[in-house]
Amino acid sequence: MAQTDHIIELRDLLFAWKAGLPSVLDMPAFTLARGKSLLIHGPSGCGKSTLLNLFAGVLVPSSGSLRVLGRDLPQLKSAERDALRADQIGFLFQQFNLVPYLSLIDNVTLPCRFSAARRKRALSAGNSLDEVAGRLLTDLGLETDHNRPITALSVGQQQRVAAARALIGGPALVIADEPTSALDPHLRDNFVEQLFASSRAAGSTVILVSHDPELGRHFDEVMDLRDLNRAEEHP
Amino acid sequence: MTLLHLALRSLLNRRLTVGLTVLSAACSVMLLLGVERLRTESRQSFMSTVAGTDLVVGARSDGPQLLLQAVFNIGYPTRNIGLDAYEEIAANPAVAWIIPLSVGDTHRGFRVVGTNESYLTHYQFARDRHLELESGDWFSGEDSAVLGAAVARELGYRVGQEMVVAHGAGEISFAHHEEHPFRVSGVLAATGTPVDRTVLVSLRGIDAMHAEFQGARDQTVDITDPLAVAMARAEAHDHAHDDHGEIGSGSLSALLVGLHQRGAALGLQRSINESDAEPLTAVLPGVALQELWVVVGVIERSLLLLGGFVVVVGLMGMLSNLLATLDQRRREMAILRSVGARPGQIMALLVVETSLVTAAGAVLGLGLVSAAMLFGAPILETRYGLYLEVGAPSAAELRLLVGVVLAGTIIGLIPGWRVYRHALIDGLTPRL
């Protein structure tokens, strides 16, 4: 890992789906220090998902600089961005987070199949990947038989499995896209607290995107994307 | 490794539809391999029938026709060979043995062939196997007959049975040689060649039978007078016995010739074909078979092409099946992208899946063909005298199988390419 104090560092970032189309993101400057958790909120259509795809290296800015974990993403080849994501970034989606044909434990250990680095880090925390996955699931409050078929899990349980997958092998950054929108308020707070506890233990920084500003009290930094994004809204 | 594991789990998760796809692929592969195997095995079977014979000699005709008449019990020659020709060929120092054949009569649909003991000692099939008697003895006189295995089985005849031979081909004949019945002296072991469907009698037996038939017809006998009939018959019989050579009166249809050295076959063939004495044709069985395959080959190729088309239809079914499920799998692809899968890996996952499905179909198809052969071989052998060997797949079959799997893999590139595009457009947030 390149030594840097910043998890995210962007300057004059512009993004349009195609050259000639109006920009959907136009951000002058933003930095997130290592170890700080960040909530990005804003109504749907304000470019949150696009921003996450940029952070993840799936999309590339049309212009401007974007450094994630010290790496200059636009300068990397797409395979290098994929490798960076595999090694250093954990993901958590709104719902339907799990691969239907894999077992619960196999879903958690999936990132270790694509990244030798995460596999190695995960194995430094236990004897086997299955054991590490099981411990993560327990820490995240999944009190169920880990051999259950994933189709038998509730939405809340599925999100915990997905959180364990995002955290296994201690990625430097965990990005969560509306992970709580399918959960009721009580479950929501409980889930976010456990996510934070586990990501602190794993040494991961959390960036969470939500339309719900109420979650803000859990975070070090809260950003309303509308304040930072100068681009017109394109629903 | 990762992709193979994922592909296997994904296929297992959809085991019903995948199972049906594998089954349809297997059926089309079975058809393709079945045609191929029948093709090569029937050639093999034909080849093995003439394996030990170096030359087939008959009255002037065309090579494949002579071969079919003399060896494969198909069709009758229009002219016979004279005794002189037989003796001339037999006198050639290069000739090791001659099997004389006289055809033209049937018994209940089975061909009756007049020959001599050299048939038993020299006829070879399946490369180097000789005929064996399963029961009884080789015919000894002019009124005993030896049955092929299929004749004995289908007619239920045993040694000692009496039988009447009809003149001419076909199951129903109105000219019966009832004056000269034969008695079964022996039954041959099964060979998987047309011999199984043949009744063998001595050449003198054929002569005697025809002489009596001729005699009975030539003389105007009052058939109401038993004494006159008996006298005519006795006279005719005596007439038939005038000629006591082993070869009989000399009405031969064809000769199977074995040489001391196979290399002499071409020279002998030429000298027979160019002989001034009598218009004869000598053919090398292998060459005549090749000529036959040129004709049959068109049908074979059409069948193989048809089999190929069935495989293509099967693969198209698989393709439409796969494409239909792709939209449902966009979320899954986004998850794989999020854990670091490259778009190329996602494409590879789809291609690996189709390869696995076609490979499973190919293996299952091979199994079905082998099973069908195992059960079908005895039926083909008894019904058509076609002897099939059930064994490991041939190189040609393996090529077909590899071709099918390759075609499946290439077809997998189509959904593969689609998910590749999806992966690039969707990123981590599929637009459903």
Image: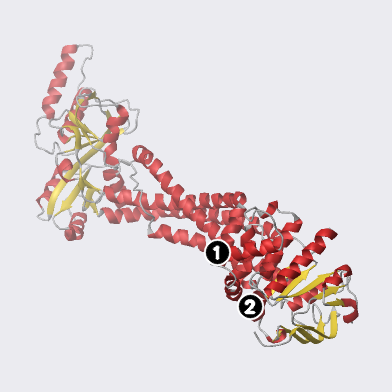
- Viewer-side residue, B197 vs B95: B197
Residue B25 relative to residue A170: left or right: left
Element under label 1? helix
Element under label 2? helix
Q: Where is residue B142 in the image (x, y as percent from the top left)?
A: 15, 30
Q: What residue type is labelled 2?
A: Ala
Q: Is residue B398 above or below residue A9?
A: above
Contact, mark 1 vs mark 2 (Cβ under 8 Å) = no
Using the image, tell me which numbered label, if any, was put on residue A132: none
Look at 40% across and 45% down and name the residue there. B373
**Quarter in which the C terminus of chain B is drawn:** bottom right
Give residue B411's quadrant in the image. Answer: bottom right
- Viewer-side residue, B318 vs A183: A183
**Disc 1: CA contacts within 10 A as few (<14), some (14-19) or many (>=20):** some
Residue designated by label 2: A83
- CA gap between label 1 and label 2 equals 20 Å
Look at 80% across and 67% down and name the residue there. A178
Give residue A70's quadrant in the image. Answer: bottom right
Look at 18% across and 16% down and name the residue there. B229
Q: Position of residue B191 (x, y in %)?
A: 26, 42
Using the image, name the chain to which the residue with label 2 belongs. A
Q: What residue type is labelled 1?
A: Leu
